[in-house]
Image (spheres, helix red, strand yellow):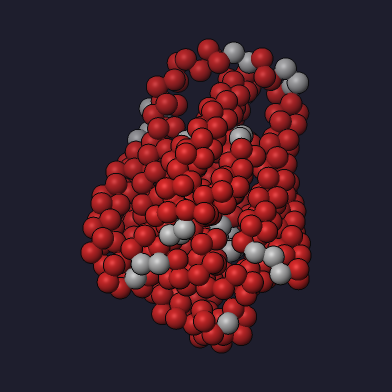
Amino acid sequence: MNELVRRIVKNSSYLFSATGISAGLSMLQGILTARLLGVETFGVLGIIIMFTSTVNKFASFRMSELVVKYVGQFHEANDHRKAAALFKTAALIEMLASLVAFGLIWLLAPIGAQIFTKDPANSGLFVLYGLIVLANLVAESSTGLLQIFDRFRRLAVLNVVQSVITLSITSLAFVTGGGLRHVLLAYVAGKMISALGFSLAAMLEASRQWGRDWRSAPVGLLRPQARELAHFAISTNLSATLSLVNKDSELLWVSFFRSPFEAGLYKLVLTLTNLVEMPVNPLPQATYPELSRQVARRQWQNVNQILRQGSFLTGGYSLVAITILALLGQPLIRTFYGADFLPAFPALLILLAGYLVANTFYWRRIALLSLGRPDFPVKLNFILAMLKVVGVVLLTPRFGFLASAALLAGFYWAGSFISVLKIRQLLNQAASVPASE
């Protein structure tokens, strides 16, 4: 393992430790929530969370990615004023997008409650959970800045704090016989505190790196790169929008075509697959800044080593974890969640096959961003989204959440392999161009 990969693993280890703790706490919280609410209301909880996330991502420009690539690039070139100007601009745009997102959640809540939960009375719960969006006004930009300067320990601590708060309130609801509203309050409290923590930590880090007057950096400094920056931001927004169809709205499709009860079963499937994703989730955050630095320096051999060794680590872990979960999945569900959730197991097996490939090539999107091709994931996701919509419309009404699991697994397989082929092509082309050019 070379020094670059070792640094990525070190940075991701902070997040992994936090993710491991958070995953354990979240699993306990999920067990308490599932037993407290039952299958159908557990599905309603998942629908509310996914609906809010979908609307928020629709308005989001994924500012963390823009900040990592370009603020990191400017800082690497010692152009600190331009780096500060871009971070300030990204934070302001994200703030505006968050306000728009909350407004949309407020307006669409009655429709979402009627269509997806089949109960208009739930509209207030959609708005309640939507408060998270207001707390996350500049959380994405802040997270990106903390990643650039390797402040992964701070990110890790805040993630653990969020999980502890959420579990504590959920446990109280379980003991006192609370309901869906109490569980949503637990989620809101935890996420609001962590989001505000990210924002405060980033503001302090910006002052440390660029001085207390960093906010005065003129936005006009960005004019020469305005078109490039706008193209990147719009591309990542389109990519995020398309991913809403491909993988971020699963429960909504299932509930729309079937029922909140099946959404509850599928929510458990998605929850259990988090056990496989757990160590892999932090890696894109830790890998992206390092990949961007090596691309900026034209160190193609280092880029290849990062990708190759990253796949070796994540693929090996995923194969072992998936095998264990496939063997022990049924007794795990029966013991901890209850026999009512056992029909979820076949869908779990299907989806695990997709996560094996997705985890192995976890770097596929961030590699394309680092190589200056944010448009490629957009085009690919658009094609896959159209195919997946056709599949959802034709198959989900008949086969329910099993079809959704199969379509999502297919999306991961197709998207991963096509992206990897494109990345190989781009790296070969880049390596053939002399450094002077």
Q: Residue at x 57, y 30 (%)?
A: 95
Q: Is residue 35 left or right of residue 100?
A: right
Q: How many marks?
A: 0
Tell which of 225 and 327 is nearer to you: 327
Tell which of 289 and 410 is nearer to you: 410
64 shown above or below 335: above
Q: Is residue 192 left or right of residue 417?
A: right
Q: Residue at x 54, y 85 (%)?
A: 339
358 shown above or below 61: below
Q: Is residue 385 left or right of residue 229?
A: left
304 shown above or below 349: above
Q: Residue at x 68, y 36 (%)?
A: 199
Q: How far from the left and from the top, in percent, is residue 30?
A: 62, 68
Tell me the quarter of the image containing the N terminus: bottom right
Q: How far from the left and from the top, in percent, is residue 15?
A: 66, 55
Q: Residue at x 76, y 62 (%)?
A: 168
Q: How far from the left and from the top, in percent, is residue 357?
A: 41, 65
Q: How far from the left and from the top, in percent, is residue 285?
A: 57, 48
- Residue 412 shows in the view: no
> Furthest residue to the front?
121
Residue 408 falls in image quadrant: bottom left
- Residue 34 shows in the view: yes
Q: Is residue 315 left or right of residue 409?
A: right
288 shown above or below 358: above
Tell which of 337 and 434 is nearer to you: 337
Tell me the quarter of the image containing the C terminus: top left
